[in-house]
Image (tube, rainbow, N blue to C red):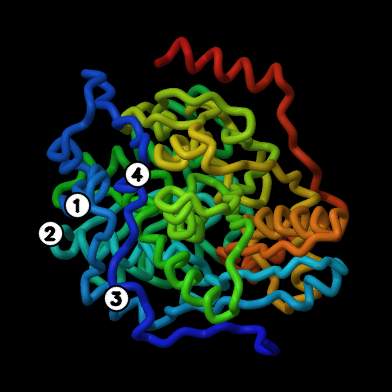
């Protein structure tokens, strides 16, 4: 087939999200109330989340969750997204592998994050909520939530990791354009932020810190809920529209992937592209490899421990069973801000523990080299986060070349990098480096975690 793009129509947009926990033999361990250490009950989540989202979070029985009509209508603005055969990249690599990517960068905010932002804003609005809070790393989630909040008439406060607040000023501008209030985190506006700044005055922030501040503000503000862009199960659920569409598109291409790849921070886009394919492995034993590509500077899946940990730095969230480097882990200031998170979601962590998926760590310079090659071959400049998935796909393609075997590779291009050009400038100037953790650093953080939990 000579076409590069495999396009669907509006009628092909999924009518239901896929809940993988219903098909898992070993369900994720329950999240725990940090005070009682007992499994969290749905009603205990109501002060923080919209009730519908709390229900989705704990639902482990229904494989399919209907997408509300109003949400699906909003999806039609940019969905279905294209599936593209990367002929240019294949030629550049001189590989027998067939490489496909799902292009989520075509959304109004340039990334996959809008799939869940629209859903979460809708459920908050349905409950009569007027204010919402959230955190953001690189700013893609903050941008998506800002747009979704404006669509549904909600007031939004975004705590943006301070290093990204300064590294990525145009993402901040996007949020403000959509009417959101953006605060550099850690800040003096919350108890959690004030404590961190008192203890570490020059601390440049982490997603764990920003989550703490957003949660604290939500709890203290009347008629306010907290929303988030990754890690928790209901976020993974919403993102499965990516893989469900990709399944149909791979059928149009006449192929089925041998390996599915997504970059990995907390797990949202990785889960979105992989879970619909993984269900065939769970239910039918179909052979397929699922690979998470995480930064070498934040290697929770490749070098972290599987145990209960907080989702935030201050310890406000429930305890989550996760692969973690410790909630007090301070990640290096790499430009892939969306991947600077200490832990993995409970679903992904259980799947990793049970051997249903793999993980690779990618060095920062390797990710930018892969991003540059992809841009030159395919004409799309990827976000630094997505570059990790591209680097992993290139590794797979090169391995296929060495073995002289055809391999079908599918990865998620989770967002474009047109607002990340300062990072590319630094890369071309030779001002970026690799950040890798020593065994001593990893073990020290995990030892601290054992004392805390």
CA gap, disc 4 and disc 2: 20 Å
Q: How many marks are shown on the rendered structure?
A: 4
Report the mark closest to the observer, 2 or 3. 3
- Tag 2 secondary structure: loop
Distance between mark 1 and mark 2 Cα atoms: 7 Å
Q: Is residue 70 left or right of residue 287?
A: left
When asked about the image quadrant of residue 40, the answer is: top left
Tag 1's secondary structure?
loop
The disc placed on residue 72 is 3
Residue 34 is drawn in which quadrant?
A: top left
Q: Which residue in the structure is indicated by mark 4?
A: 214
- Residue 50's disc is 1
Q: Nearer the viewer, mark 1 or mark 4?
A: 1
Q: CA distance from mark 4 to mark 3?
A: 28 Å
- Residue depicted at x 14% and y 52%: 223
Label 1–label 2 contact, CB within 8 A: yes
């Amino acid at each position: 087939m000579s076409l590069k793009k495999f396009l669907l129509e509006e009628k092909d947009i999924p009518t239901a999200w896929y809940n993988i926990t219903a098909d898992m033999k070993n369900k994720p361990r329950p999240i725990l109330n940090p005070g009682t250490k007992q499994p969290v009950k749905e009603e205990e989540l109501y002060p923080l989340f919209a009730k519908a989202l709390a229900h989705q979070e704990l639902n482990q029985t229904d494989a399919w969750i209907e997408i509300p009509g109003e949400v699906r209508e909003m999806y039609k603005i940019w969905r279905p997204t294209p599936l593209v055969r990367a002929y240019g990249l294949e030629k550049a690599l001189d590989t027998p592998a067939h490489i496909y990517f799902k292009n989520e960068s075509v959304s109004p905010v340039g990334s996959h994050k809008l799939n869940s932002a629209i859903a979460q804003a809708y459920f908050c609005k349905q409950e009569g909520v007027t204010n919402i809070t959230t955190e953001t790393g690189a700013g893609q989630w903050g941008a998506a939530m800002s747009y979704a909040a404006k669509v549904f008439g909600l007031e939004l406060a975004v705590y943006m990791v301070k290093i990204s607040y300064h590294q990525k000023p145009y993402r901040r501008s996007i949020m403000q354009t959509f009417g959101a209030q953006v605060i550099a985190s850690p800040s003096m506006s919350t108890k959690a932020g004030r404590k961190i700044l008192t203890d570490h005055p020059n601390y440049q922030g982490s997603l764990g810190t920003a989550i703490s501040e957003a949660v604290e503000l939500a709890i203290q503000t009347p008629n306010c809920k907290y929303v988030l862009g990754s890690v928790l199960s209901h976020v993974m659920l919403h993102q499965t529209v990516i893989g469900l569409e990709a399944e149909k598109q791979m059928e149009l291409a006449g192929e089925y992937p041998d390996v599915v790849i997504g970059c990995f921070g907390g797990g949202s886009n990785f889960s979105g592209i992989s879970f619909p394919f993984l269900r065939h492995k769970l239910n039918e034993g179909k052979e397929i490899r699922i690979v998470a590509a995480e930064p070498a500077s934040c290697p929770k899946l490749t070098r972290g421990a599987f145990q209960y940990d907080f989702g935030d730095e201050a310890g406000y969230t429930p305890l989550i069973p996760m692969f973690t480097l410790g909630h007090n882990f301070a990640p290096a200031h790499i430009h892939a801000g969306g991947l600077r998170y200490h832990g993995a979601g409970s679903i992904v962590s259980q799947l990793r523990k049970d051997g249903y998926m793999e993980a690779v760590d990618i060095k920062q310079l390797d990710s930018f080299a892969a991003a540059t090659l992809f841009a030159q071959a395919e004409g799309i400049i990827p976000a630094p986060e997505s570059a990790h998935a591209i680097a992993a796909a290139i590794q797979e393609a090169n391995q296929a070349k060495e073995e002289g075997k055809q391999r079908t590779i599918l990865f998620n291009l989770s967002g474009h990098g047109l607002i990340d050009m300062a990072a590319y400038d630094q890369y071309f100037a030779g001002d970026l480096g690799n950040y890798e953790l020593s065994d001593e650093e990893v073990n020290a953080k995990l030892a601290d975690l054992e004392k805390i939990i």
